[in-house]
Every structure is written in C-alpha cells, then in structure tokens.
Amino acid sequence: MSPKTFLAFIGPSIVMMVLFIALPLASVLKQSFYVTQPVYEILEVETCTPNFTGQVCVVDIKTIPIIGEDGIMKTKTSFVGFLNYQNVLEFPRVITAFANNSWQQFMAIDFWKALRFTLSFTLITLPLVLFFGLVIALCINNVAKSIRGPVIFISLLPMIITPVIGALAIRWLFIGDGILTAFLEWWLVRDIAMFGQAWTIELMMMFYRVWHVAPFAGIVFYAALQTVNQDTVESAIIDGASRWQKLRYVILPHLMPLIVFVTLIHLMDSYRVFEEVVGFSSQAHVISLQWLTYDFLMLDQTGNRSISRASASAMLTMIGIILLLIPVLRGVWIDYKGKRL
Amino acid sequence: MKDINLIRQPLGLRLSSYFFLLFWCILAAFPIFWITVMSVKLPVDAFNSNPLNVIFGPATLTQGKGLSFLDITIGLAVLVATAKLSTSWLVGMVNKFSPSGFLWAGWIIGSMTFGLLFIVVFFGIMPSILNFLNDFSGVLGNKIIGFSTEHYSTVWFEKGFIKNFQNSLLVTTGVVTISLTFGTLAGYGLSRSGSNLAFWILIIALIFRALPHSVLVTGYLPFFMNSAEILRPILGDYAPTFYGMPWATVAVLVAINQPFTIWMLRSFFQSIPSELDEAARVDGCSHFQAFRRVIMPVMWPGVITTGLFSFLLAYNDFLVTSLLLEAQNTTMVPAIASMFNMETTTTDQVVAVAAAVSIIAPLFFLVMFFQRQIVSGLTAGAVKG
C-alpha cells in the first residue's frame, strides 16, 4: 500500500485523535500551570447602626468579587508555575508526617492516600486475577463440551455488567444487615460493620475487581488452551511428565504471551480504579487517583470546580501510568526491532 | 484432534473441576440474581437479614402483591417460547423479508418489533389474563411468592428514567456509529501497512488506551463550559454551550474508545488474507473499492464484535457523562448515583435496586444473543497481542 492511500485510510482517525485526545492533553498540561481566580476589589464599607447614645459607625474592609457588565464575575488567569502541583502533593505536610514518623499523618493527605490505594489495589488484584483466570480456564477445559457454553455465558455476566452496578450489587449484599453480613455475623458470632472501616471496604473492592476481571482472563486463557500443541503434550506424557510438570513446562509457556496481554490490560484498567469508589461510596475511607481528579472537577460546596488542581492531579496520574507502562513498551520495542532485523 | 487430556484425567480431578465451576457460576451469577429478586420486593423484605424472607417476601405477600404457581409456570413457558421464537422464527422472517444488502437493517427492524411485541404481551396483556385465570384455579391460583413491580414504575415514570434512557440511546448510537466508521478505515490501513509510521501510531494508540478517563475530561470540561464564549467569534450568536449536551459527550467517548477500536479492528482485518484484496486489485479495483466491495462483506463479524465493545463502553460509562452532563439530564448510569446517595429511606434504596436491574437487563440479553461474538472479540485482541 502506497503511503498516500495509507494516509487516506488512517487520516480521519489521526485527525480525530489529535483533535480529541492530544489537544485536550496539551490543554490539561497548560491548565496545570495556571490558576483562574475571580478578581477581587477591596472596599471600605461604613456601616452605621443606631444606638441609645446615637449612631455607632464601624468601617469594614471587605473584599468583593468584581461583577462585569454582563453579570458574570470577572476572572483573571495567571501563571503560577508548580503551585498547583504543590497544592496536590502537599510536601510540607509530607515532611511533617515523616518528621513525626507518622504513617497516619502521611495517609491523611489526599494524594498520597489515593496513590497508596491505587498501587496496592493494582498489585494485589493482578496475581489473583491471573490465578483465578487460569483456574477457570483449566476447569472449563476439563469438563464435558455440552456444559462449556452455559458456563461461559454465566462467566461473561460479571465481566459485561456496568461496573458501577456490579459494585453496587455487591454493596447491597453487605450493607446494613444485608444477607452476607448477617451470614458472617452468624458464622463468626460477632458484630460486623463492613462499611465501618477502610480495610473491609478495600477487601470488598478487591473482591469486586477480581470477580469482574477474572472471567476475561479465564476466557482468553481458555481460547489459548484450545491451540496447545497436542503432540508436545503427548510426548511430555510419554517422557513421564507428571500432571504438574505438564502444566508448568508445556501449557504455561504456551500461555505466556496471553498472560503478558492480560497483565497489560489489567494494569491499565485497575490503575484507573474509579467505579468501585462510587459504587461502595467509600470516599470517606478509601479514594483512588482517578477519583481524586473527579472530585476536584465536581462542584464543591461553594459552587466552584478546582480545574487547576484537577489538571495537576491528572498530569500526576498520567505520569504514573506511563512509568508503569515503560517496561512493557520497552519489551514491545525490542520485539519490533528484532522482527525487522 | 485426539483429546488425550480427557482420557487420562483421573476422576478426582474431573470432579473437582465440576465442583469449582459450580462454585464459580454461583459466585458469578449470585449478586446479579439477588438484586433482581430484591427489586421486586417491598423494602422490608428486600433488606431482610433472612435470605428466605428476601426470596419469598412475606411482607410483600400480605399486601396482596404476589405470584401464584400458575403465574410462574405460564410466565416461564412464555419466556422459553420467546427465546425459541427469537432464535428460529425471527431469523427466518428477517432473512425472508429484508432486501438483499440490507440484512442489517432487517435485523434492526426485526428485533425491535419483536422486542416491542414481547413487552406488550408480557407486561401489558398477560397480567390481566393471569389475574382472571387465578380466580378460577383454586390452590394453584394462591399467591406464594411476593412480587411487586411498583419500584419499576417509580423508577421509569416518576423519576424520569425514560429521559435518561433516551439519552443513553442517543449517546451509544452516536459512539458506535462514529467509532466504527473511522475505526474500520484506520484498522484496514494499519493492517495492510508494515511501515514504521503504522507501528508508532499503534504504540501511541496503546498509550492513549491507558489514559485514565478523568485526564481527558479535565481537558474537555473548561472548554465545554465556556464553549459559547470561545466559539462566538466564529459562530456568532448560535455558538452553543457544550456542557450538558448528550451529543457533545459522544465526541469525548469516541475519543476514549478510538484507540481500542483501532487495535481490535486491525487484528480482525489481519485475519483476512491480503491475497483477497490483491485479487480485487488485479481485477481493477482501487484500494478503496477493494475495501468497500471485497473486504467489508467478509468483515461483518469483526465489525459487529467491535461495535458491541464500543456499545458497552458508552453504555457503562459513569465518569464522563456524570461530569459533562447536568444531573437532571444524564444517561442511565450516572442517574442511579443520585438515587442511592439519598440514603434517607429504604424505599429509595429499593428504587435504586430496580433502576440497577433496569440498566443491566439489556446487557443480559446482549450476552445471550452475542455470546460468540463477545468471546471472539476477547480473544481477537489477544491473537496479535
């Protein structure tokens, strides 16, 4: 295909990606160095109140936002350097926390709290997803062909369901005296409040995520199991390989590219964990990086959106995902160069 | 192919496989099944700590809202018959009556009429017939399971879920059409080119795929809120404010979706041998004609699969729509957030449960009809990695 026809095919998508992804990203970068604030003027206001002895006058100095002729508050955008980043990262508080040697103080800072949760969430769910995906795939491969279809149908449900609703469905099983909480209380003979402390909520969130993603891993692995070279398996058995050795030395190497693929997808997806925070209403205890940006963007009590802070936290989130992806991208690059040589 | 796995499998291992799968299926389906059961009960039953009370709903029964044995049998029979009809009769009718080349239009019209017919019969006609029958059938007509649809009518008619549903429909249709149109062109181009440029475009698309959605929305939000002012010099007084407009969110969702669409369609196009378009070129087609007349007709399964995933992304989205649309005029998923946040009464909670079930019901049918396409889509991305 000549470069010209190639460009004709790919052009519309490129224009769209530049216009709708690259430009917004550039504007986020710019916003993160600027702050837009209402312009205030300082006025001296004299208020007089009648009193028994006559009038008492007080002079107040008030700062009021200037309202333009069109009735909209005048705003001014100014360059502030890394101030927004400092506001998000809050280094002075971090230093105090470290000086006091207090993990709790450190975790009271929103950004670090969110980073801690996002990373531990990603890294804990990853092995669980891979393990359960593999077990599901091996089990489906082991049972009679006639029940594979229905099992795959049921397995697809948790995967395809709206994430917020999936999280809600699990929350409703536990909330208040929900049946699973009641069951746990009966089993452990003690009072349980699943939504009372951070670690139980985190546990439910991770459970939800594994429930949501394991079917995806399972089906991808199952499809790959169909293409395992039967001759290799047969010769391994003839050579006296045990069942475990067969799995370890024949099947797992065959699945390796797909394990990398699922890992990549899972890293991307669980790094932007967000719906769980909404579904479990966990913002008082547990927040994630993406939720932090979301919260900055929502209207606060005073009716403002802290766009600049949101931009700073969005940029930090993005830097995080790029750092996570660098090892993978290096692998792809080496692979690509190897193919071309 | 010989399946030596199967022959040599000891019984213990096979039995444990069955047990594990049984356990997994219960685990996978239980939360979904349970919220469906909860949604048709009065709050006292729905949030009862005794599971039997949730299933049978004694408090719901005492209000005279329930299903008899007869209702359940006939209801199930109609459901099974519908499923059978939709897989055999409907296929035949669509194939017979749609003009050649417009099979997809036939499917859209056919399934819509079928769905509408089912809704009218199942929810409109059947309840009154069954009520009449229950009075004559003695013991069989006694109500045994609590069942009430009042929360559904609250959600759809009082809370204005119909409006949200229309918005969802608009947004998903827009996203699916636009991403597929642009995506098939790009996916075909990329699959037939081995240049460095193609490689870099794919890598950049991969990085964009990893972007948290809130990063993009942070870029869009200020522009959307002030778009009237920013665009005034160009469009004059007609400059719209994008914030709060469902079709404006389509652009954002397409942008989020596009990298994924391109990757998936590319791997589907790669599975079509390039000898096919070479043959067409020899016969005198231009690249674009080969694409349109030769490649696209064999590409439909891939396009449908990718369309399904685009649909899911747009339908399931919470973040983008809740930030860019006003709370009164959102799509279905963000609308539910405002329902479960008012934790004042348990009635509100059950209404939220009913809303949740309303949202996932279409997804359930989607999996039912397109299971094969979804599975092939999951593996397509993996084929080339």
Image (cartoon, rainbow, N blue to C red):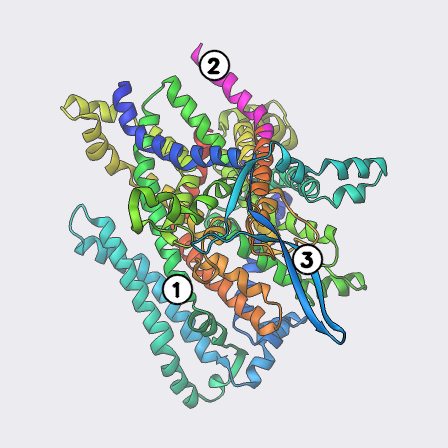
Q: Quadrant of residue A218?
A: top right
**What main secondary structure does the magenta stretch of the protein show?**
helix
Q: Which chain carries label 3?
A: A
> Which label belongs to residue B40?
none
Do callouts 3 and 1 mark residues in contact (Cβ within 8 Å)? Answer: no
User: Quick one: quadrant of the N terminus of chain A?
Assistant: top left
Q: Which of marks 2 and 3 is nearer the N terminus?
A: 3
Mark 2 falls on what kind of element?
helix
Q: Name the residue under label 2.
A: A337
In the image, what residue type sits under mark 1?
Lys
SS category of the residue bearing label 1: helix
Give the residue furthest to the top. A341
Left or right: residue A89 versus residue A67 is: right
Q: Name the residue under label 3.
A: A60
Per the rendered image, the range of residues in magenta is: A323-341
Relative image position of residue B152 (x, y in whole percent): 47, 71
- The amino acid pointed to by label 3 is Asp
Is A269 on the left or on the right of B321, as rendered? right
Chain of the residue under label 2: A
The tally of labels here is 3
On what subunit does the disc labeled 1 rest? B
Report the residue at 16% width, 47% height from top: B100
The answer to whether residue A10 is above or below residue A211 is above
Tell me if B128 is positioned left or right of A192 in this view: left
Name the foreground residue: B382 vs B162: B162
To the question of a shared chain for discs 2 and 1, the answer is no
Q: What residue type is labelled 2?
A: Lys
Q: Residue B97 appears in which quarter of the rendering?
A: bottom left
Instruction: Indicate which disc residue B163 carries.
Output: 1
Label 2 packing within 10 angstroms: few (<14), some (14-19), many (20+): few
Q: Distance between the residues labelled 2 and 1?
A: 53 Å
Q: Residue at x 65, y 32 (%)?
A: A244
